[in-house]
Image (cartoon, rainbow, N blue to C red):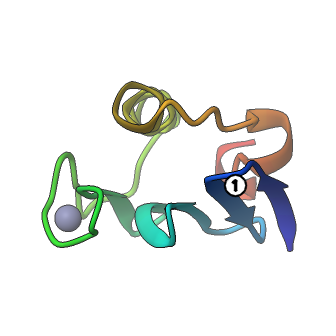
Amino acid sequence: MNQSVTDRSLVRSDGRTVWVDVDGYTVGRFSQFGIDLHTADSSGCIDCTHERPDIQGWFRFVNGILDNYRVEIDGGIHMPDFLR
Ligand SMILES: [Zn+2]
């Protein structure tokens, strides 16, 4: 498991799935099954898909996390293998 930690965020990945936790809630998940970008208490959807993302979907996810949570995802560490 790869992990990137700040004082309020945790980005984890295992080569297939990326999870983004902010303030203890999992607000982002990215995998071949789709994208989840959720509200700060993880109860609602901001930008979710249920289809296999391509590289544009990856940047959509990374930018969505950055815009909504000011959390940067290091693609060199966390980009899933199916996009490499
Ligand atoms: Zn959702």
Q: Spot the residue most to the front.
A: 7
Residue behind mark 1: 80
Residue at (45, 70) in percent of width and height: 26
x and y, in percent, of residue 13 in the image: 73, 65
Pick the residue in front: 16 or 6: 6
The total of numbered circles placed on residues is: 1
Residue at (37, 33) in percent of width and height: 64
- With respect to residue 47, does 82 lie above or below? below
Give the image quadrant in which the ligand numbered 1 is located. bottom left
x and y, in percent, of residue 23 in the image: 50, 62
Mark 1 within 8 Å of ligand 1, using the beta carbon: no
x and y, in percent, of residue 45 in the image: 15, 58
Please tell me in which quadrant of the rendered image residue 9 appears: bottom right
Quick one: SS at disc 1? loop
Residue type indicated by callout 1: Pro
Query: Which quarter shows the N terminus?
Result: bottom right
Pick the residue in front: 32 or 30: 30
In this rendering, position of residue 22 left or right of residue 7: left
In this rendering, position of residue 81 left or right of residue 47: right
In this rendering, position of residue 68 left or right of residue 66: left
Query: Which quarter shows the C terminus?
Result: top right
Residue at (50, 30) in percent of width and height: 70
